[in-house]
């Protein structure tokens, strides 16, 4: 009997992951929540986003 975790990893390795680069940038403005939601609606398994450090101004 195969271990359930092994089966899950095996299935993941044999599948194609669809990742929305900055969301669905051809449909919505990139790096926005609207774009991330649209990517998931279109069937993306995950989204990639850019994070930048900013300086807080008082």
Image (cartoon, rainbow, N blue to C red):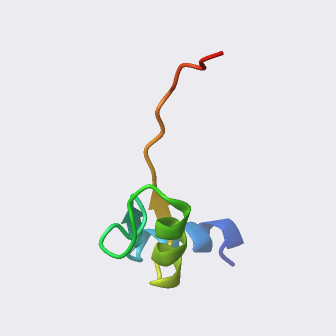
Side (left or right) of 26 relative to 2 = left
Where residue 46 appears, x then y in whole percent?
Answer: 50, 66
* Above or below, comparing residue 43 to residue 20 in the picture: below
Residue 7's quadrant in the figure?
bottom right
Front-most of residues 28 and 40: 28
Quadrant in which the C terminus is drawn: top right
Q: Residue furthest front?
A: 58
> How many numbered discs sit on the rendered protein?
0
Foreground residue among 35 and 9: 35
Q: Position of residue 5 (x, y in %)?
A: 67, 66
Q: Is residue 52 above or below residue 23?
A: above
Image coordinates for residue 6, horizontal then vertical, percent: 60, 67
Tell me the residue at 41%/66% (across/down).
19
Could you tell me which quadrant the N terminus lies in? bottom right
Is residue 26 or residue 17 the one in the foreground? 26
Residue at the spot 34% in from the left edge and 66% down from the top edge = 25
Left or right placement of residue 35 versus residue 9 in this view? left
Front in this rendered view, residue 32 or 18: 32
Q: Position of residue 37 (x, y in %)?
A: 55, 72
The residue sitting at the top extreme is 58
On screen, residue 20 above or below 27: above
Asked whether residue 15 is in view, the answer is yes
Residue sticking out furthest to the bottom: 42
Residue under the point 49% across and 59% down = 32
Res. 3 visible in picture? no
- Residue at position x 52%, y 69% from top? 34
């Amino acid at each position: 009997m195969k271990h359930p975790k092994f089966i899950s990893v095996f299935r993941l390795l044999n599948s194609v992951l669809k990742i929305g680069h900055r969301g669905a940038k051809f449909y919505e403005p990139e790096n926005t929540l609207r774009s991330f939601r649209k990517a998931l609606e279109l069937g993306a398994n995950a989204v990639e986003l850019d994070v930048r450090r900013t300086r807080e101004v008082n």
